[in-house]
Image (spheres, helix red, strand yellow):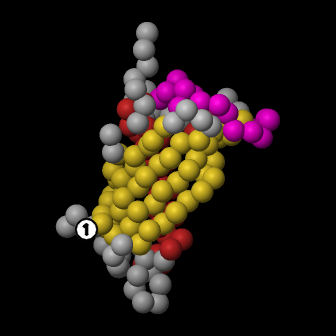
Amino acid sequence: MTFRVTIAVRADDLDVNGHVRGPAYLAYADHARWTCVQAAGIDPAELTARRIGPVNLETTVRFRRELRGGEVEVGCEFHWGTGKTSRVTQEFRISDGTLVAEVESVSGLLDLDRRRLVADPGSYWRELAARPELLGLAPKTG
């Protein structure tokens, strides 16, 4: 399942050429991921209370077309494996559906006390989420 959020491009997100600046894409991607996590029913304060926190280990941005202003729709799709990391792919599209950028992140869930990635981060997210399907996880069983 792909979660989507629409973000207004602010004037201070633009460079001197009128294009959205690179760091703004990263901010939009972060905003969309956190909006998705919260829509799934996860309270960031609960993560802190459990002494775990999400971390980005790698982020790649691919610019496809100009993004100059207006609004951009940012999607989030989570991909889970068997290790300590997951991948999030995000497409940025303008109102006519044109793909303007893609962001791909490799993320983990950090044990805040041990300062190490937890094994099977998807199990933690599934336990905390009211709507785990928004995070690409199967619903809880039992």
Residue found at x 40% / y 46%: 77
Dot 1: element:
loop
Q: Quadrant of the C terminus?
A: top left
Q: Is residue 93 left or right of residue 82?
A: left
- Kindly identify which residue carries mark 1: 98
The magenta stretch spans residue 125: yes
Whether residue 7 is visible, yes or no, is no
Say which residue appears at 19% left-offset and 67% top-offset. Answer: 96
Residue 113, above or below 33? above
* The stretch drawn in magenta includes residue 128: yes
Hey, which residue is sitting farthest bottom in the picture?
16
Which amino acid lies under the numbered mark 1 shown in the image of this protein? Thr
Q: Quadrant of the N terminus?
A: top left
- The image shows residue 132 at horizontal and vertical percentages of 42, 30
Which quadrant holds residue 102?
Answer: bottom left
Question: Residue extending furthest left?
Answer: 96
Q: Residue at x 49, y 37 (%)?
A: 80
Crowdedness of circle 1 by 10 Å Cα count: few (<14), some, many (20+)?
Answer: some
Q: Is residue 107 left or right of residue 140?
A: right
**Magenta residue span:** 112-129
Q: Is residue 134 above or below residue 107?
A: above
Give the residue at the far top of this rendering: 142
Q: Position of residue 106 (x, y in %)?
A: 56, 50
